[in-house]
Image (cartoon, helix red, strand yellow):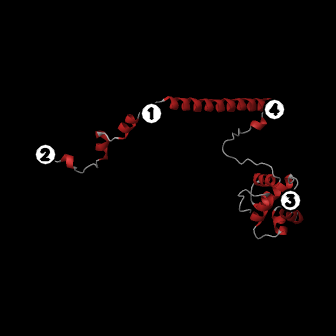
Amino acid sequence: MNPRNTKPTLAELVLEYKGGRSNVELSRDCGGTPSDKRIHQIINKPINNFPDPETIRGLAKGLHTSEAAIIRASARSLNLEVNEDTGRDLIIDRAGELPLSSQNALRTISAELIKLNTESRANLDAASAAEEAAQPINIADRRKAKEPTEERRAARQPKGKIGPGDLPHE
């Protein structure tokens, strides 16, 4: 794998995951697709197109990884931007089974909520900055806040030990 790039291209992924297996052995472990000749091409020649679904499934099986990993590596090989899952995406289980009109409604509502959230954050940031800028700085108040009070001094005293202030005065 490319030491500068922690996210491998398809060739890098195949080389890393194939281990000591020959291309013939890897092809066999992939269920015969891709062939050993195709594996050689994937490793040694830049790809111009996405692999077909059978090749993706076979490589995932033979390399013991996910189809998604093969797809992402293929996209990187084609210089396509690949957004990894950052946890910022919301996937609604089975939403793809909804009618197209319902899917479009969800997309529209989502886009509007994101827009409102972005605007709201910008407004809160601006209001907070304005409020902070409007506050006068009183150095005397800051000094008083830093000075230890009797309560703070008492809290610092270890429990169960006698200090000089606890001794009777004559």
How would you rate the neighbour count of disc 1 (Cα within 10 Å): few for under 14, some for 14-19, many for 20 or more? Answer: few
Pick the residue in front: 70 or 115: 115
Q: Amino acid at mark 2?
A: His
Q: Which residue is mark 1?
A: 137
Q: Is residue 28 left or right of residue 8?
A: right
Q: Which residue is mark 4?
A: 100
Q: Nearer the viewer, mark 4 or mark 1?
A: 1
Which residue reaches farthest left? 170
| Residue at (85% x, 63% y) in the render | 39
Q: Amino acid at mark 4?
A: Leu
Viewport quadrant of the N terminus: bottom right
Structural distance between the alpha carbons of marks 1 and 2: 43 Å
Q: Nearer the viewer, mark 2 or mark 3?
A: 2
| Residue at (83% x, 53% y) in the render | 78
Q: Which residue is mark 2?
A: 169
Structural distance between the alpha carbons of marks 4 and 2: 88 Å
Give the structural element (helix, strand or loop) at label 2. Answer: loop
| Residue at (52% x, 29% y) in the render | 131
Could you say where residue 135 lies in the image, as x and y percent from the top left?
48, 30
